[in-house]
Amino acid sequence: MQKLCALLSVVLCCTTTVLLAQSPGGGQMDPAAMVQRMKERMKPMLIEKTKLSDAQADKVIETQVWAMGEMRGMRDLTEDQRAAKMKSINEEKEKKWKDIPLTDDQIKSVNTFFEEMRKNRMQGSGGPRQGAGK
C-alpha cells in the first residue's frame, strides 16, 4: 500500500509539472483552470483506458487536482513528514474515489492509468534527473 501511495504521489507530481509547464502565466494557473485543462487533455484518454463514465472521469480529475494542491509545499518537510502527508492525502483521495462511487477494480484501473502517464512522462523527458534540487 505504501508503494502504491508513493507511486501515486510521483504520478501527481509529474502530472502537475506537465500541466504547469504548459500553462500560460508560468504555472500560475488557478485550480479551476487546471481542472478544466486536465478535463480537456486527459479525460478522453482516462475514459478510454479505464471505461469510466463521463461524470466519473470528471470527479476523478477534480480529486486529482485537489490532491496535487494538497501536495504543494512538501519540499520543506522532512522525509518522514512528507511520507506521512502523502499517505494521508492518498488515503483521502482513495476515499473520495470510493464516494464517486468507483469500485476497487475501477480505482486500480485509474491508478494504472496515472502510473502509465508518469512512465510516459519520464521516458519523454529522458528519465529522472540526477541530483535535481541539490
Image (cartoon, rainbow, N blue to C red):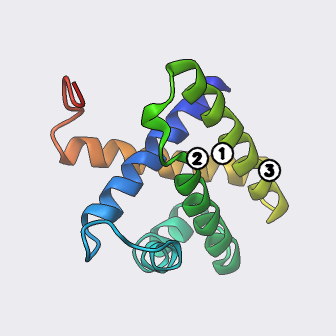
Residue with the mark numbered 3 = 95
3 vs 1, front mark: 3
Amino acid at pointer 3: Lys
Callout 1 amino acid = Lys
Using the numbered discs, state the Cα–Cα distance from disc 2 to disc 1 in whole angstroms. 5 Å
The image position of residue 8, as x and y in percent, is 54, 41
Say what secondary structure mark 1 lies in: helix
Residue that label 1 marks: 108
Q: Of the residues shown, which amino acid type is indicated by label 2?
A: Asn
Q: Position of residue 91 (x, y in %)?
A: 73, 41
* Residue at the image point whose x is 29% and y is 72% from the top: 23
Q: From the viewer's perspective, is 62 left or right of 116?
A: right
* In front of the other: 56 or 20: 20
In the current view of this chain or complex, which residue is farthest to the front? Answer: 76
Q: Nearer the viewer, residue 41 or 129?
A: 129
Q: Mark 1 or mark 3, which is nearer the start of the sequence?
A: 3
**Residue 115: x and y, percent?**
47, 44
Q: Are marks 2 and 1 in contact (CB under 8 Å)?
A: yes
Q: Residue at x 67, y 43 (%)?
A: 89
Quarter of the image holding residue 37? Answer: bottom left
In front here: 104 or 8? 8
Q: Residues within 10 Å of mark 3 (few under 14, many from 20)?
A: few
